[in-house]
Image (spheres, rainbow, N blue to C red):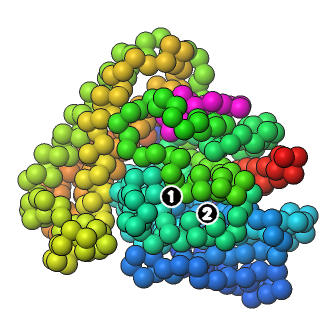
């Protein structure tokens, strides 16, 4: 399966921990895919479809030969490694069941960002703290799916160019992007409605004891077709968080629309929280969000203060020398980038989002704001400074910076507070994979029916 299902243990706070389960690395994913292709060469094909900014190969595993296609994208966010084992699990199921590939070929991009995956080294997370000690998530312009939403076409990273080219080649009726959240619940985002998806999605989540995040901040204000199933609003619709810079309609998710297709983004949690499935009305959402806004500013200020004193970051006060190679060339920067530059860029990018979001959360909330809506923003508010601090900490530790112990104490405390406040419990990896795979298969079946009817 690409993962092993083993026993769990719990500490005295009740937070479940992983013992021996692990997410496969990109190298392991490619090796498993190569074995599958060698076992059934008449059916399966593994090929290199692109090269990352650092020269790593991007691999596509294809099963079946039909013109009508499903494209499954794993690893678009380096810190969400569940997509890889789900893609392999799906590939094996499709190869073993001719009904799943009747009139349809399946294509699995095993890792959309192998450079990012090489920096996120938390493949056996024993706790939320352990996960953040090895954390990496690129800055927005360096994420392959999001880059087109914030960068002009001639500035796109090669990973984004590869993904766009794949969509042009395959013209999938359905693209599925496999994502995960560190702590929360499961939900689906759709670029266009898939009738019939909501009920089996909810049934799968219930069977595997995974809460549905019914009010995720990622889809705040979007139309819903069932609990946790959100449809992206039409271009030009009012957005709930005006400060966020991306334009989702320019992302790779919408690229499939030019061929009559659509995209489903399937999220599943590593650690679950039943607080995100509470649809009761919040008694005072405005006061709660004011508290979240204040805490966000205060925590970000603590990270900024340490960053300003760190010897390593003083050297890069302009951040120009930390820019990606293509941006550096355009700007005339000639100093070689620091080997930990992606971590520092990502930390800086996350902190730069804070002032705008803190202001957004002071705006009047929806009149029918639920407990889940507030909880999701609460989690977002904890996550942002924690991630910035965790990535900065990795660079400071590597450099032997004297500010590292102070930042380490912050990261440790914030992880413990996050896990405790949300009553985190580990979701067995086999359940993460099974739920994501079921949702993909259901989406493919119903989207095809809808496409045929059209």
Q: Does the segment drawn in magenta span residue 216?
A: yes
In the picture as drawn, the residue positioned furthest to the top comes out as 283
C-beta proximity under 8 Å, tags 1 and 2: yes
Please give the range of residues in magenta.
211-227
Q: Which mark is residue 247?
A: none
Question: What number of labels is visible?
Answer: 2
Task: Look at 45% across and 52% down and name the residue there.
Answer: 149
Q: Secondary structure at mark 1?
A: loop
- The residue carrying mark 1 is 145
- Vertical side of 166 occupied by 79: above or below: above
Main secondary-structure element of the magenta-colored stretch: loop
Name which residue lies at 25% across and 61% down: 344
Question: Which of the 4 image quadrants contains residue 330?
Answer: bottom left
Q: Secondary structure at mark 2?
A: strand
Q: Decide which of 248, 46 is in the foreground and name it.
A: 248
Q: Residues within 10 Å of mark 1 (few under 14, many from 20)?
A: many
Asked if residue 42 lies in the magenta stretch, the reply is no
Along the line of sight, the residue nearer the viewer: 20 or 326? 326
User: Which image quarter holds the N terminus?
Assistant: bottom right
| Residue 310 location, quadrant | bottom left
- Judge left or right: residue 451 versus residue 149: right
Point 58% across, 79% down: residue: 49
Please indicate whether residue 272 sits to the left or right of residue 120 in the image: right
* Residue 385 spot, x, y in % from top left: 30, 44
Residue 73 — which label?
A: 2
Residue under the image location 29 percent in, 74 percent down: 325
């Amino acid at each position: 399966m690409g993962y092993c299902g083993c026993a769990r243990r719990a500490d005295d706070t009740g937070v479940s921990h992983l013992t021996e389960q692990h997410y496969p690395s990109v190298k392991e994913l490619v090796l498993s895919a190569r074995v599958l292709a060698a076992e059934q060469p008449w059916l399966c094909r593994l090929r290199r479809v692109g090269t990352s900014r650092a020269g790593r190969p991007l691999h596509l595993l294809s099963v079946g030969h039909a013109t009508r296609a499903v494209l499954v994208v794993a690893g678009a966010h380096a810190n969400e490694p569940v997509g890889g084992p789900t893609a392999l699990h799906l590939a094996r199921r499709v190869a073993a069941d001719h009904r799943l590939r009747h009139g349809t070929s399946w294509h699995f991009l095993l890792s959309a960002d192998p450079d990012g995956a090489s920096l996120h080294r938390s493949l056996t997370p024993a706790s939320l703290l352990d996960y953040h000690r090895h954390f990496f998530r690129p800055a927005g312009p360096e994420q392959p799916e999001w880059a087109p939403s914030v960068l002009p076409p001639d500035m796109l990273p090669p990973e984004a160019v590869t993904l766009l080219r794949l969509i042009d080649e395959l013209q999938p009726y359905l693209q599925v992007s496999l994502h995960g959240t560190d702590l929360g619940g499961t939900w689906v985002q759709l670029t266009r409605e898939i009738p019939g998806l909501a009920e089996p999605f909810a049934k799968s989540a219930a069977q595997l004891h995974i809460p549905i995040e019914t009010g995720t901040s990622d889809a705040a204000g979007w139309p819903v077709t069932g609990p946790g199933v959100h449809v992206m609003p039409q271009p030009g619709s009012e957005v709930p968080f005006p400060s966020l810079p991306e334009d989702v309609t320019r992302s790779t998710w919408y690229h499939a629309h030019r061929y009559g297709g659509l995209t489903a983004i399937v999220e599943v949690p590593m650690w679950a929280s039943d607080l995100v499935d509470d649809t009761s009305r919040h008694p005072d959402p405005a006061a709660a969000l004011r508290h979240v806004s204040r805490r966000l500013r205060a925590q970000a200020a603590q990270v900024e203060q340490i960053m300003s004193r760190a010897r390593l970051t003083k050297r890069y006060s302009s951040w120009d020398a930390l820019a990606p190679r293509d941006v550096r060339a355009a700007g005339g920067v000639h100093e070689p980038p620091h080997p930990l530059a992606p971590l520092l860029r990502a930390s800086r990018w996350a902190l730069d989002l804070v002032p705008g979001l803190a202001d957004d959360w002071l705006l009047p909330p929806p009149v029918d704001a639920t407990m889940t809506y507030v909880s999701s923003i609460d989690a977002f508010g904890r996550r942002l400074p924690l991630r910035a601090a965790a990535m900065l900490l990795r660079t400071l530790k590597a450099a032997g910076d004297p500010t590292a112990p102070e930042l380490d104490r912050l990261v440790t405390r914030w992880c413990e507070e996050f896990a405790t406040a949300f009553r985190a419990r580990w979701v067995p990896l086999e359940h993460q994979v099974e739920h994501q795979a079921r949702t993909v298969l259901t989406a493919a079946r119903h989207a095809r029916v809808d496409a045929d009817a059209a």
